[in-house]
Image: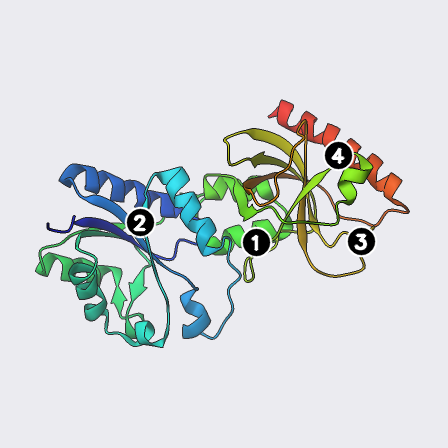
Amino acid sequence: MPETKRVIALGFFDGVHLGHGALMRKTKQRAEERGFTPAVLTFDTHPDTLVKGVEVPLINSPEGRAEIIRRVYGIDSIIFIHFNRAVMQMPWQDFMSSLVGELHAAHVVAGYDFSCGWRGEGKALRIAAWCSAHGLGCDIIDAVKLDGEAVSSTRIRKCITAGDMEEANRLLGHPHCLVDTVHYGFQLGGKLGTPTINMRFAEGVLVPRHGVYAAKVFLDNGEEHMAVTNVGVRPTVSGGDRVSVESYILGFSGDLYDHTVRVEFHHFLRDERKFSNVEALREQILRDAETNREYFEAE
């Protein structure tokens, strides 16, 4: 039985922002027009890590990226390539040929600034010309701009680092989120009457500004809840420097250990700080919960 042909979006897609969304929508459109399968090809690590020797903090883990692509844009076929020296040094024409021979590409969609192959020589216009010569369809997507400036992962990283979630979410086109399995913590929250779920950012993923956020938590059974989420090192009860993500879910009781949960960050409430005792911490969490309710009611 012949393999189903694919329309493939090419890129790294860190954060899956509005610019990336333009590629995803075009990919789905072309796939529907031609009866092909929409797909996304991306890399497990940022190419700049190897090409430039620069560690780029990621907006999402690879798993987080895939989750957003499926949930927000409805594309289930996501292909991860391990970006290693062989991929970096591959002639761009060979890269394009592999899309056809191995992944059954019949049409590709790329951003104006996409490049592939050795020294990035496979730039967007060259890719378009190659596709035309080899019988493939091709769309090159222009920059998506907000406030006269191109939407970019770099721009969004600055917002997340500053705790400006409203602006980050505007550029992303969806709330910035963390998807993770709930881990066992110190269980102090339960003793204080404010039980929390504990999660962690994967290694290499950008940690937002430390502090308390108005958030929403989505459970694996589909339930949605408001939450007060603390990102930081828990200075009142811990002397360490390991960053944790703790969410007090408003109006929820139950065991979520080992469940996969999505936390969406909506608004920075306050900086993380050390309290004189755990009772003072408890009182502040309850005040944060009320501020949280007010924020979402106003929204």
Question: What residue lies at 69% left-to-right and 31% top-to-bottom?
Answer: 292
| Residue type at numbered disc 2 | Asp
| Residue type at numbered disc 4 | Asp
Which residue is denoted by mark 4 in the rendering? 288
Viewer-nearest of discs 1 and 3 = 3
- Could you say where residue 139 lies in the image, as x and y percent from the top left? 22, 49
Marking on residue 282: none
Which residue is denoted by mark 3 in the rendering? 235
Marking on residue 158: 1
| In-front residue for pair 145/80 | 80
Q: CA distance from mark 4 to mark 3?
A: 17 Å
Q: Is residue 11 left or right of residue 235?
A: left
Q: CA distance from mark 2 to mark 1?
A: 23 Å
First in sequence: mark 2 vs mark 3: 2
Q: How many numbered badges does the structure rendering display?
A: 4
First in sequence: mark 1 vs mark 3: 1
